[in-house]
Amino acid sequence: MRLLQIQALEAVTVRGASDAATEGSGSYAVAGVSRTATRLPMTLRETPQSISVVTRQRIEDEGLNSVEAVLNQTPGISIENVGASRYTIYSRGYAIDNFQLDGIVTAMDIVSQNIPQSQSDMAIYDRVEVLRGAAGLMTGAGDPSGTLNLVRKKPTHEFQGHVAVSGGTWDRYRAELDLSGPLAANGRLRGRVVGAHEEGNTHIDYYSQNKTVLYGVLEADATDSTLVTLGVDYQHTNPRGQSSTGLPLFYNDGSQTDFDASDNAAARWNRNEMRVYNTFLSVEQQLPADWTFKVSANHLEGTRKFSGGDASWGFPDRHTGDGVRLYGGLGRAVQRQTGIDLQFQGPFELWGRRHDAVLGFNWSEYENDHEPMNDDMEGRDVNLYHWHNDTLSSVVDGKLMDYDGWQKQRGAYAALRLRPRDDLAVIVGARLSRYDYQLSQIYASPALARFNKVTRMHESGVVTPYAGIVYDLDDTHSVYASYTSIFKPQSQRDSSGAVLDPRKGDNFEIGLKSEFLEGRLNSAIALYQIRQDNLAELDPGQTVPGTSPVEAAYRAVKGAKTTGLDMELAGEVLPGWQLGLSYNYALSRNADGEQIRTIFPRHMAKLWTTYRLPGDLNRLTLGGGINWQSRIHYSATTWDLPGVVLQGQQSAYAVVNLMTRYDFSHQLSATLNINNVFDRKYLQGLDQTFHTGLYAPTRNAMLTLRYQF
């Protein structure tokens, strides 16, 4: 048994300070650096903003196989599901619409549901880094919410790999293979391949999922000072019976509906097939005086074919189930994104001290072509209680419209980390940006030409400053303060049809960060305030003139202010005991003191922990956690129900998850995850546009057998 205890220890590989890979660490804490905030190589403690990292160990412990699953467990993040596998990510009360893939910025637009990044499988990623707060230095235009950085697995210098198979509730099955290691005897060429397939039913009637993922990456030491990385990933998702909108949230008397969590608004034949290709390349060149030059590029292309009908348009009669029409149709969509980042980074001497600098330029272009067909789906009446998700498919009569959009962002950025003293760092930076956006809706039929519209936005010469200061109180604790500005063009229109002015504001944050037990346990406490003008808010009862279907109108809110608190503890508390604990508070008010952004919970608390038993029981690991959030709600009026005020809400709830893992040997293990142990029924967000909601998964379990090479 003593020999087993020695074998259970993870191998430790010493790498450079820039390597923040979490795979194989066995930890929920991050020992390396992160470049998500400023591109400067800084540890979490050295970064004057709130950053949470979901490590590879935690992903495996909780069985988090999708980006959505990871974000549901991430501190300070709230997911609003506006349909099955269609969601908006919120942080500090505002939507996150910027993803980074290995640090390369990509955009996200849920208008056509063609959102490849949010459907990503976690088999190919080492970790997810989440920066909360304004991220304008790297992303340019954006909300004061944050950004997500999905960091891919990279080839390893030593051979390693694993195979895993899973099975669980609703006839779900998954298989995964991951192989990595040197491809040349001298180790200068390394490779990695990952494959995964998952399929099965869900807690929602008639809704099944099917997903295949392939990933390959090469890494080469082209010279002693040049590192080249080239890779591609592919994902094919092909669900059936998937609702794009969810169930009606209100009856026709204005009261809130209460369906079974398994009820589905979608027709059984609904289809939403997506194929996504992602290619990426980076070249990192070491320069004299410890400087580096790095160029990185990412190209994403996704195609989507869809057809469906959802019983979600309108308000059903509570007693009869009548009053609902189908919403949907069929068509295709293509999305293309290209991002490039160039940077010089390194140290310099000034005033007899060593400082750091980064100079860079990034460019991103996003194009989304959406072609819905002209069919007879929308407007069909159904009885929500008796249709049994069975209706005739669409009769097609040519193309309905071209619904196309594109977005271009480019910007130059610079940041300095000045060290006037050993215990003090001052970070200053700025970005100069240009932003262009266009969204066009052009109907194929001349009879509908009066509904054609083109929305354009252009901003140039926009300067986004950044400032932060970090002071080390001692070897364990640091205090910090930071500031960045907010700039966000908006496509929403008011009741006169005019596009709202760009949103502008400021983001302030102060905090305390600590590293305990030689960095194995990290903690952070932050207070922040966000001030904004021209914040878009629904204008109750108002619509945009000349729109079909009718568009809700928005109004600009002045003097909006969000105040909040973030607290987090992550890492190893005691030998064998890993912990992730967080509490987040956010309250937004307008200039009149009225609360706004109420579909984001004011309070959130998340806990996940595992413990590997000691001594003769060290083959067994026990774990569990709880997610709790406070009530969310909204009020609205609609032209469909004149004189009725809709009051939608989801009361406070807590969800408990459990896991256990048994190691048959150092190589073979079995992990059982049980989610929503007490079968809590709740809505995963409130959609204010369609007035619909989607219920969360009911109690479910998954057993995974994993063999490590």
Image (tube, rainbow, N blue to C red):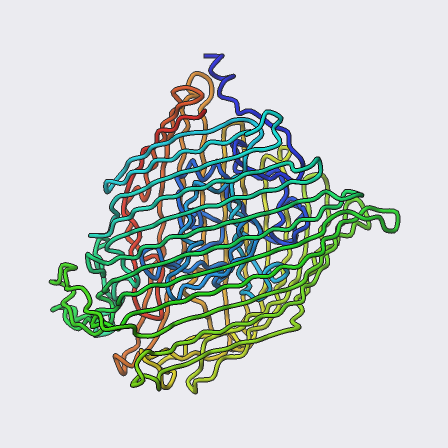
- Spot occupied by residue 141 in the image (x, y as percentages of width and height): 57, 66
Who's the residue at 20% across and 72% down the image? 376
Q: Is residue 314 visible from the viewing direction of this image?
A: no
Q: Is residue 698 left or right of residue 488?
A: left
- Spot occupied by residue 700 in the image (x, y as percentages of width and height): 28, 42
**Numbered marks: total:** 0
Whether 460 is drawn above or below 107: the answer is: below
| The quarter of the displayed image where residue 31 is located | top right
Q: Is residue 217 visible from the viewing direction of this image?
A: yes
Whether 18 is drawn above or below 435: the answer is: above
Q: Nearer the viewer, residue 208 or 619?
A: 208
- Spot occupied by residue 644 in the image (x, y as percentages of width and height): 27, 79
Q: Is residue 253 left or right of residue 614?
A: left
In which quadrant will I find the N terminus? top left
Who's the residue at 35% across and 66% down the image? 687
Whether 322 is drawn above or below 64: the answer is: below
In which quadrant will I find the C terminus? top left
Q: Nearer the viewer, residue 31 or 228?
A: 228
- Spot occupied by residue 312 in the image (x, y as percentages of width and height): 24, 67
